[in-house]
Image (cartoon, rainbow, N blue to C red):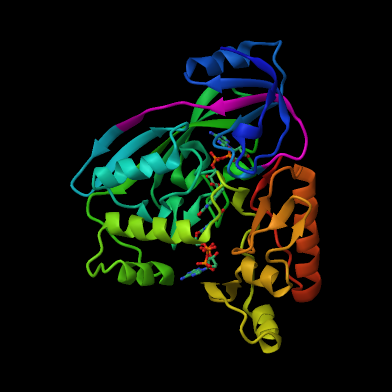
Amino acid sequence: MIIQQNKPLKAYNTFGIETTAEYFTELKHLDTLHEIAADETLPKRKVVLGGGSNILLTKPVTGLVIHNSLKGIFIKEENEQHVWVEVMAGEVWHEFVQYALTNHLSGIENLALIPGRVGAAPMQNIGAYGVEVKDTIDQVTAWHWAEKRFIVLRNEDCDFGYRESIFKHLLKDKVLITAVTFRLNKRPTLHLEYGAIQAQLETMGVSSPSIKSVAEAVMAIRRSKLPDPAMIGNAGSFFKNPTISKQQFDLLKAQFHDMPSYPVAHDQVKVPAGWLIEQLGWKGIRRHDAGVHVKQALVLVNYGKASGSEIQSLALEIIKSVQSKFDILLSMEVNIW
Ligand code: FAD
Ligand code: NAP
């Protein structure tokens, strides 16, 4: 185990924020977890870092930052319909999607090109284009820091919700996810209900889609709409889409006729946060090097030298303005460190 001190983190977060980790180590072997847990000279605070695509670094990180680089993909079991695949948490998410496509396994094709590593996928139950990862997760294996042992959580133990899980709440900072077992389908059930996918497949001239063409459609849409962190620092959607009561929505709709919504439950609707932010004129705004992306109001960006706290201040201003205009409280999807 190699421990580094005052490690620069700019290359480890997609916002490209310049700050440091007090202590830093690469986690390549499961045994190292016992070593870290037994070493009394290491700080008590342990922070897990994956691809750094869902964090905002607002200050130097105290404690030990553990960069998850556990690798491996193993087929655990299969039957006529399904294959259970265990994936180590340090695998790159999109590379696992490509593995599934190559092996004709369906379930995660709509989640193509989401940045980050497999270990963070259960964390916020990653989702896109009408699919959430929870529907393919069989179980999650994690190292429990206080108990100094591995624990296994079945899907139903993970409290998955819209961009939510037990790992963001009860188990926050208490465990390090080491592996995720997915149950993928041999016979595809395609999810094409998300309008943009249908339109893109038509543009591509695809009349009978496969998991591969759906993934290609998703990738084409994402490349055309979303800022590439390699070109401009960002962490994807900064805010979650809020869910409000149908009653509140009806009152707002009477005032703002073109307010979009998607049903969540019989008395609740989801309102796109990007629409609310755009209505207030935030899209494309720039404060020094912190800004709101010109094409996508839900994405905050770092034009170069913005600090994490400048981006956080901009986010708080946006939350305040949305609340005062629409009486809707936005919550941040990005993890503030
Ligand atoms: P990190 O940013 O490294 O970590 C995120 C949080 O998870 C941190 O709190 C960290 O401590 C914790 N964590 C990470 N790994 C572990 C582990 N092994 N054990 C315990 N805790 C851990 N998200 C979506 O849901 N859908 C999208 O479509 C989507 N599109 C995006 C597009 C862009 C351009 C970008 C930049 C981001 C996008 N995201 C999206 C957000 C992000 O990619 C996902 O949330 C991703 O799962 C984060 O993975 P990561 O490895 O980068 O996590
Ligand atoms: P979009 O297609 O412009 O749609 C705006 C919002 O409306 C989305 O956030 C989506 O909510 C909702 N929506 C649209 N069509 C829907 C439908 N048929 N059913 C239910 N909800 C619908 O969104 P976008 O920004 O380009 O993103 C496309 C997809 O990629 C979305 O699923 C989004 O969540 C995902 N994405 C996520 C991140 C991230 O960092 N979390 C970043 C980029 C893209 P949902 O978000 O609930 O799907």
299 w.r.t. 327: above or below:
above
- Rendered-image quadrant of the N terminus: top right
Magenta region, residue range: 56-74
Q: Residue at x 74, y 65 (%)?
A: 329
214 w.r.t. 14: above or below:
below
User: Left or right of 130: which side holds 234?
Assistant: right
Q: Nearer the viewer, residue 215 or 158?
A: 215
119 w.r.t. 5: above or below:
below
| Residue 258, percent from left and from top | 61, 84
Residue 320 sits in quarter = bottom right
**Residue 329 visible to an observer of this rendering:** yes
333 w.r.t. 62: above or below:
below
| Residue 335, percent from left and from top | 66, 45
- Rendered-image quadrant of the C terminus: top right
Residue 47 sits in quarter = top right
Q: Residue at x 43, y 33 (%)?
A: 91
> Is residue 71 located in the magenta-colored stretch of the structure?
yes
User: Left or right of 25: which side holds 17?
Assistant: right
Q: How many labels does the image show?
A: 0
**Residue 144 visible to an observer of this rendering:** no
> Is residue 154 located in the magenta-colored stretch of the structure?
no
